Amino acid sequence: MTAASELPDPRVAGGTWLIRAARPLGGAPADILIDSGVIREVTRPGGASADGQVRVVDADGLIALPGLVDLHTHLREPGREDAETIASGTAAAALGGYTVVHAMANTEPVADTAGVVEQVWRLGRRTGRCDVRPVGAVTAGLGGERLAELGTMADCAAQVRVFSDDGRCVSDAALMRRALEYVKAFDGVIAQHAQDPRLTEGAQVNEGEVSARLGLVGWPAVAEEAIIARDCLLAAHVGSALHVCHVTTAGSVEIIRWAKSKGWPVTAEVTPHHLLLTDELATGYDPVYKVNPPLRTADDVAALRAGLADGTIDCVATDHAPHAAETKETEWSAASFGMTGLETALSVVHEAMVLTGLLDWPGVADRMSVRPAAIGRLDGADQAYGRPLAPGSPANLVLYDPAPIRPVDPVAQASRSKNTPFAGMKLPGQVVATFLRGSPTVLEGRLTR
């Protein structure tokens, strides 16, 4: 792989690139000509001109997708740079095919003011290998008692449109209603971490057979489902946008399906790990599998996959949650909740959804780029994300090789933290190149001139 220091600056529109014989959305091969950050031509192979100033990428056998969009990333900076920085987290994102990530608000200090979200945004512009859109907190200090400065965060340079107390639930119904009412004025979104705190006190793992065998406090599905049902009703009452973070249960899928059938403004996401892993992995007490919300049952996994396939669940979001080794490599009860996921997300979706026939590659592009861009309010005329691979579109794209099957090696990952639940697991595919505004942030061995 070409070192990041040897690649063009991704914050500046790149020069002229010819991507030869890629397969846009897994279809017929085509040449893609990029110039000054924009796709200029998409033609049959050999149909695009390439003079001496054009850099050529051999993309034979590679699938071209629009650059991926993550609605749910923990970059930890400011405050927990021992676990991740914006530089390291966005390097991981680029290796995973992402061109923009939404940085969650549970930093230290909390991103609950214009000053903090602008700090995150400016750090992203200065050191990011992909674009960074800050998520603002819903409540001050994530305390769940009073609203944060939603309006000033929306009006500042970072132009925040997504707000979440992720890691904690906005459990007060009146406060949740006020938040929904407030953001409606500027087309904002409240992204809810659905977890009733009273029903999950001390919870460690999904409530069921596994929790009973292990003697760990169970995390009932109803703790998620009750909040989702309440908030869908609130969103309908207010007429404001609700996004449900990391859906994990079959019951949650049914509630969201019902809300959408009513035409209510509700969207939802699922994580890669909840599409592939089950609570049976907790039987070894390995805290790498400790996550919030917890891994659920095989029946839940099947329902999540079906919900993503039929569009009930709108998108895949990583919930990339890096932790320093000392907070994960400890006994289960003391370990932090969370898993990394940026560098493996596309491969996991390939495994769970494409190889099973539940999604095709246009469907993957829809769930990992188009829809999350729309939910994050990044699909406007002045935005560069979630666009089709067509002439005139911004040159944000990923080239993916579906052929290799490789074991996941945490040591080789760019993230500062190595708490991937997929370590040693053989997953399909590899991101070969990621282009941001026509500049490659990742380029693995395919440059021919």
Image (spheres, helix red, strand yellow):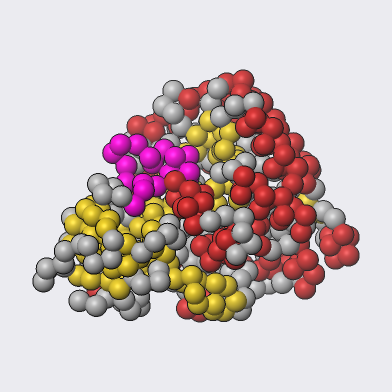
Residue 344: x and y in percent read 52, 66
Number of marks drawn: 0
Q: Say whether residue 374 is magenta.
A: yes
Q: Is residue 253 left or right of residue 143?
A: right
Quarter of the image where the C terminus is located: bottom left
Q: Residue 396, position in %: x, y?
A: 33, 55
Q: Does 296 appear above or below 4?
A: above
- Residue at 41 percent across and 27 percent down: it is 186
Is the residue 337 above or below the residue 53 in the image?
Answer: above
Location of the N terminus (image quadrant): bottom left
Which residues are the magenta region?
Answer: 371-389
Main SS class of the magenta portion in the image:
loop
Question: At which x and y percent is residue 406?
Answer: 54, 79
Relative to 274, is 31 on the left or the right?
Answer: left
Give the residue drawn at x 18%, y 55%: 36
Is residue 256 shown left or right of residue 106? right
